[in-house]
Structure formats: structure tokens, C-alpha cells
Image (tube, rainbow, N blue to C red):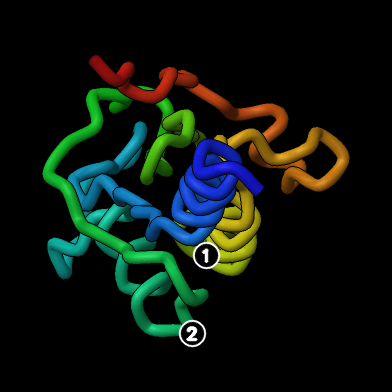
């Protein structure tokens, strides 16, 4: 093998194993009022995600706002040289397992593109934005 081929293989392996981050808007409340306990649905979703088993290579991070306020709870998936995805209309009580599964599938890719048939149904119908990876100079 040439050095170029070996370097390309190492680069592909690094991209495939690069950690990913699931950003969770903890300020999300959608159309509802803030509950009496002051824990917004976005915070409840974050708590549900971090209270369970997080897949290897995935980090869950709370963020203050993802500017998708009208569409319920919102998250973003990013990492390495992958495409970044923003998903909305999430249910804080029901969607944590699906998000962790989707994050694990996203981590298993080198480019962030989960094959259509392998995507959770919610990912297929509730993608707010898809952002290309940063270009290298």
C-alpha cells in the first residue's frame, strides 16, 4: 500500500470513530406554558436522555436555545466531518430512546448520512435543517 492509501484509510477510520454531540435545547417549551416546577419540556428531554445509557461515542450537551421555538423540543446532531442535523417536534416524555438510537446510528457513519431506511421515522419527517460539514482549507 502507498502512503496515500494508508493515510486515506486512517482518515476514514478517524471520521467513523470521531465522537458526536447531541445538542438539546433546554429552553424549549413549544406552545405550552412553563410547568409549575419550572422544568421546561426541553429540560425534561435532556434529563431523560442523560438519565439513561448513552451510546458510546455520543455526548449529550444542554444548550440554551436552538431558535426553533414554535416546533416543540429541538435537538441537533453534529460531530467530526459529518453533516449536522437539526430535528424538531420532539416529545420530552417519549422520544429519548429514539434520539439515543438515532445518535448511535449517526455516530456509526463517516459523513452523518444515515441510510433512509435505517433512520428513525421521526428523523425522516421532522428535520428542520441539514448543514454541510465545514470545509477544509
In-front residue for pair 120/18? 18
In contact (CB < 8 Å): disc 2 and disc 1: no
**Where does the image place residue 105, in percent across and percent down from the top left?**
65, 55
In the visual, does 19 lie left or right of 7?
left
**Where does the image place residue 24, in percent across and percent down from the top left?**
30, 51
Rendered view: 109 above or below 54: above
**Where does the image place residue 130, in percent across and percent down from the top left?**
49, 20
Q: Quadrant of residue 95?
A: bottom right
What is the crowding at mark 2: few (fewer than 14 residues within 10 Å), some, or many (at least 20)?
few
Name of the residue lying farthest toward the front = 2
Q: How many marks?
A: 2
In-front residue for pair 19/128? 19
Q: Nearer the viewer, mark 2 or mark 1?
A: 2
Which residue is at 39% across, 24% downward?
133
Which residue is at 33% across, 54% downward?
41
**Which residue is labeled 2 in the image?**
53
In space, the residues marked 2 and 1 are separated at their CA atoms by: 11 Å
Name of the residue lying farthest toward the right = 117
**Where does the image place residue 93, in percent across and percent down from the top left?**
50, 65
| Residue 86 in sight here | yes
In-front residue for pair 31/59? 59
In the visual, does 82 lie left or right of 134?
right
The C terminus: image quadrant: top left
**Which residue is labeled 1 in the image?**
96
Secondary structure beneath disc 1? Answer: helix
Rendered view: 37 above or below 90: below
Amino acid at each position: 500500500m502507498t502512503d496515500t492509501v494508508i493515510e486515506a484509510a486512517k482518515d476514514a477510520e478517524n471520521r467513523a470513530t470521531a465522537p458526536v454531540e447531541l445538542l438539546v435545547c433546554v429552553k424549549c417549551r413549544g406552545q405550552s406554558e412553563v410547568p409549575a416546577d419550572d422544568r421546561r419540556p426541553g429540560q425534561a428531554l435532556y434529563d431523560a436522555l442523560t438519565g439513561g445509557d448513552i451510546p458510546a461515542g455520543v455526548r449529550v450537551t444542554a444548550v440554551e436555545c436552538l431558535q426553533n421555538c414554535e416546533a416543540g423540543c429541538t435537538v441537533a446532531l453534529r460531530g467530526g466531518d459529518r453533516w449536522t442535523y437539526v430535528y424538531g417536534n420532539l416529545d420530552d416524555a417519549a422520544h429519548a430512546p429514539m434520539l439515543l438510537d438515532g445518535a448511535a446510528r449517526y455516530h456509526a457513519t463517516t459523513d452523518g448520512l444515515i441510510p433512509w431506511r435505517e433512520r428513525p421515522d421521526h428523523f425522516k419527517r421532522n428535520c428542520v435543517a441539514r448543514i454541510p460539514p465545514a470545509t477544509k482549507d
